[in-house]
Amino acid sequence: MKIVKSRPDLCTGCRACMIACSKVLYKVEDPDKSAIRIKERSGAESGYDIFVCNHCGKCISICSVEAIYKAKNGAVRIDAEKCVGCYMCVGFCPEQAMFVHKDINEPIKCIACGACVRACPTGAIYFEEQD
């Protein structure tokens, strides 16, 4: 499967990836509803950090209602019908790549659609094949 990877050194902080993602997931241009997050570093080390799911599947075991599963294509998905909105998976994610929004009942996470990859003008976000 192809997973989204990042090169933070190429990121300009334009957040085009976040807008593209929110448009695919929720049909709105709202970076807070994106499954990829760009955060500016504070302190001496300037630049940006990029947070996006690598589909490791570690969140699957923490879900008590079995709402998180690995799809046939290898992407880790959330079944919104089963999810109870406890957000345990958000705190458990080793990549810090699951997000909460007050208007959405389940965690926001990457579905590996590639919208962010196509939107990134610098190549800071790209696909890489993973076994």
Image (spheres, rainbow, N blue to C red):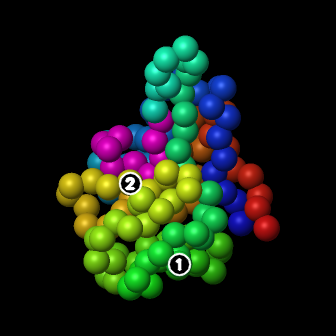
Q: Within the magenta stretch, is there residue 78?
A: no
Q: Is residue 82 above or below residue 74?
A: below
Tell me residue 86's x, y (percent): 30, 71
Q: Tell me which residue sits at (54%, 27%) in the image.
A: 48
Residue highlighted by disc 2 = 99
Residue 6 location, quadrant: top right
Q: Magenta stretch?
A: 30-38
Judge from the rendering whether residue 59 lies leftward or rightward of residue 99; answer left or right: right
Residue 120 location, quadrant: top right
Q: Tell me which residue sits at (34%, 66%) in the image.
A: 87
Q: Tell me which residue sits at (28%, 77%) in the image.
A: 84
Q: Is tag 1's residue or tag 2's residue first in the polypeptide sequence?
A: 1
Circle 1 packing at 10 Å, graded few (<14), some (14-19), many (20+), is few
Quarter of the image that includes the N terminus: bottom right
Residue highlighted by disc 1 = 61
Front label number (1 vs 2): 1
Secondary structure of the residue carrying numbered label 2:
loop
Q: Tell me which residue sits at (46%, 32%) in the image.
A: 39
Secondary structure of the residue carrying numbered label 1:
loop
Judge from the rendering whether residue 91 lies leftward or rightward of residue 48; answer left or right: left
What residue type is disc 2 on?
Phe
Judge from the rendering whether residue 38 lies leftward or rightward of residue 83; answer left or right: right
